[in-house]
Image (tube, rainbow, N blue to C red):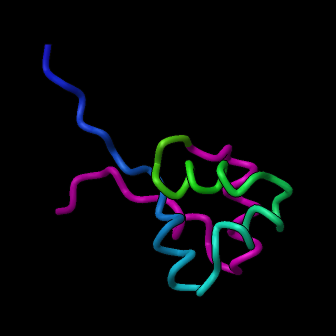
Amino acid sequence: MAKKEKVNLNRLRIVLAEKNKTNRWLADQLGVTEGTVSKWATNTHQPSLETLYQISLLFKIDIHELIESTMPKK
C-alpha cells in the first residue's frame, strides 16, 4: 500500500508571519493554548471551520486566504 502524502491544509504559519503575530498572540485571542496554535501552524491538527472563521476576522482577511488550495493548478 502506498504511503499517503501529507497535505498542508492551512496557511496559518504563513499568515502569522505576514501579520507579524505570534502563536501566543493568536492563542490569547482565541482562548486556546499556544501548543494548540502550534499544531495548527504545523498542520499536525486542523482548526475547526468556526475557528478558521474567527482567525480570518482577527486578521481581517478572507477565510480563503487561510486555506491552501488542493486543486491542481491549470
| Vertical arrangement, residue 33 with respect to residue 60, above or below | above
The front one of 51 and 29 is 29
Q: Quadrant of the C terminus?
A: bottom left
Task: Report which quarter residue 5 is drawn in.
Answer: top left
Q: Is residue 3 left or right of residue 23?
A: left
Q: Is residue 13 left or right of residue 52?
A: left
Check the image and name the residue furthest to the top: 1
Q: Is residue 53 left or right of residue 47?
A: right
- The magenta stretch is 46-74
Check the image and name the residue furthest to the left: 2
| Vertical arrangement, residue 20 with respect to residue 3, above or below | below
Magenta segment: does it hold 43?
Answer: no
Residue 42, how many percent across, how many down?
46, 53
Magenta segment: does it hold 60?
Answer: yes
Q: Quadrant of the N terminus?
A: top left
Residue 2, how many percent across, how many down?
13, 20
Count of picture labels: 0
Q: Is residue 50 left or right of residue 63?
A: right
Residue visible at 79% across and 52% down? 32
| Vertical arrangement, residue 25 with respect to residue 34, above or below | below
Task: Report which quarter residue 69 is drawn in.
Answer: bottom left
Residue visible at 53% across and 64% down? 12
Residue 34, how many percent across, how many down?
70, 57
Residue 31, how many percent across, how many down?
86, 56
The front one of 52 and 17 is 17
Residue visible at 41% across and 59% down? 68
